[in-house]
Image: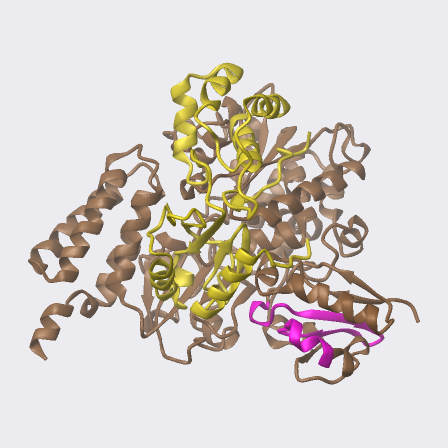
Amino acid sequence: MSTGGHEAKLGASGTGDAAALWDAAEARRIMETYRGLDGALMPILHALQDRFGYVDDAAVPDLAELLSLSRAEVHGVITFYHDFRRVPPARHALHLCRAEACQSVGARALEAHVKQKLGIDYHHQTPDGRWSLGAIYCLGNCACGPSALIDGETVGRLTPEKLDALMREAEAGRREAAE
Amino acid sequence: MSAVKIYVPGDSSAVACGANRVVLGIERLARERKLEIEIVRNGSRGLLWLEPMVEVTTPEGRIAYGPVETGDLPGLFDAGFLTGGRHALRLGKPEEIPFLKNQERLMFARCGITDPLSIEDYRAHGGFRGLAKALQMQQAEIVAEVTESGLRGRGGAGFPTGIKWKTVLETPGDKKYVVCNADEGDSGTFADRMIMEGDPFLLIEGMTIAGVATGATKGFIYIRSEYPDAFRQMGRAIEAARNAGYLGPNVLNSGKSFELETRLGAGAYICGEETSLLESLEGRRGVIRFKPPLPAIQGLFGKPTVINNLLSFASVPVILDDGAAFYKNYGMGRSRGTQPFQLAGNVKQGGLIEKAFGITLRELIYDFGGGTLSGRPVRAVQVGGPLGAYLPEAELDVKMDYEAFAAIKGMLGHGGIVVFDDTVDMAQQARFAMEFCAAESCGKCTPCRIGSTRGVEVIDRIIAGTQREKNLRLLDDLCETMVDGSLCALGGLTPFPVQSAIRHFPEDFDKPSRKAAE
């Protein structure tokens, strides 16, 4: 097996179609698929999150048993990394880049605009479950900032108006992507 | 007429600026106008302010247009851009654009030119020649060639790559590993991403040479999750290389075995630190390890491990192909070869500039970059990522060289350059450096874990004008503790941006009293 096999999608928290309901039997099948990899825990967690939008606490004892780890170790890994979620995601995920290159071209103003618009701070969801707001430190789009990730898709050269339009498109499900 | 070949970068910076929509638009218009086209998703040439930069193949060579938006497409078709027709967005031959023409591209020689997933293209442009030579050499000879080239680790620390490899070669082990650090987390850097998306076989070739040289039979590429396109592209390239016999149990019928896998990070900046990366690869929290033992002796799963930055591996094929002497001829002092500098932030012409060490920061920002995007004066420049120093305009004549930067209490890091204009508030930038450290600390050592949070609080008091002198002294003390007492570069270097901001821009830390005086 050449890779973790799973689709890398940071925006899995909010791919537009909301998450699948947690299914313990399917989760165990996913775990079995990747258990043979060296250092299998990270690829399994990514695969679970890709499938369900989050990693349910119910997975912890199963993972511990499968990989001969303690529950504390599994819990430690899930909570150490910013990407892994323990609760189902909002319908849409917006991650703003907070890093220096984006700051130099207006990320702080964009951040103020979004927080005011959604009425929430980082690491929160809107009460209607429509948007979550995350902070991200660099998307590698540093010559074309400010940048953000909308439902897993990187967008650049943002202004408050352009971001508003892209968020409306996401809500309407009209994003065209070639891939 | 045969199909016209059109290049539209699949590079994620180009995509973030609309390249995928441009592809759909070109396909639609070509269908409507019954024109035969073939679209190649190349890497980016690195002229990022011109992305999406579309190139068409004409009898005179490739002609570029950019930045192309979907709304420009009907006009481009009307102007006959498929045959190189005149249009306001026409840039001419890309290789003649000064930003590109004035570079010295060794590592990025192919990026943007070839189809990234075509092994034929890669070979036609000099690919796999370094590996072929390596397979004819003794292991110690390969290591000696890399040492002789003067190549130093491109991740930031600048440790001689050949010495690392020699240690792994000479350490006995039933299994050895090669690990690529592609956790490119520094703001203002994107060279790793561009190679993975635009010329992935280069990394495969470099890592395979490392495996052959040291006796390692398995490699891992640890890619940050913020780079999903690069992750997918590397997976495809590995599969193609394996199918073509460049990876597997018998690399190019040499009898040598080398396998490669990708792994995805999960949004932790600290995993760019090599021991933390190894922990993460093993499926644990990305908490750093004490050194010694060095990873070269006890690395991944306790085995001897070559762990290098992506750009270090990407430098190796040309060193083997053209020889150490050729490579060493570029550069200055103890910084040999070329470095892909990444010009970012508030700059008119941002992008990738590969040049020999020794060019000045001013030349990069003004001659290549054309000054700020906003048109306002440059006030501060951060080199080397979030742990790099902020430099004032007066220090822009510094040469891009490891030692020259150390002399002004800065660092080259991974070659990222972030430009700020005169609207920047340096006290806020200093505060952010501490805030970032607090968010990303692995928590193993106290100076970093606690010091960063205390740092934010102290800077907040200074900004508010509360006992300013006393708090500045306290901050100085705190920075000293972090530098001397932290286990790794995160805690140990966070004071660099903080103290350089205070040193060069003290007026930004004294706003309440200045306001009162007005």
Q: Quadrant of the N terminus of chain B?
A: bottom right
**Which of the pair B420/A35 is nearer the observer?**
A35
Q: Say which residue appears at 51% left-offset and 46% top-offset.
A: A14
Q: Is residue B427 visible?
A: yes
Rendered image coloring scheme: by chain
In the image, residue A94 sits, relative to residue B359, either above or below, namely above
Judged left or right of residue B55, residue B230 is left
The furthest residue to the right: B1
**Quarter of the rendering occupied by the C terminus of chain B:** bottom left
Which x, y percent locates residue B449?
27, 38
Q: Colour of chain B?
A: brown
Tell me: A139 left or right of B176: left
Q: Position of residue A47 (x, y in %)?
A: 57, 33
Instruction: Name the residue located 72 percent from the left edge and 42 percent from the top edge.
Output: B131
Q: Is residue B104 above or below residue B442?
A: below
Give the residue at x 38% y 57%. A118
Q: Which of A45/B431 is in front? A: A45
Q: Colour of chain A?
A: yellow
| Name of the residue lying farthest toward the front | A128
Q: Residue B236 sits in which quadrant? A: top right
Image check: B481 left or right of B173?
left
Residue B53 lies within the magenta run: yes
Magenta extent = B47-75
In the image, residue A95 sits, relative to residue B255, either above or below, namely below
Q: Is residue B26 left or right of residue A125?
A: right
Q: Position of residue B134 (x, y in %)?
A: 71, 40
Tell me where residue A7 sits by quadrant. Answer: top right
User: Where residue B391 sits: x, y (%)?
Assistant: 33, 65
| Residue B358 seen by the camera | no
Image quadrant where residue B33 sits: bottom right
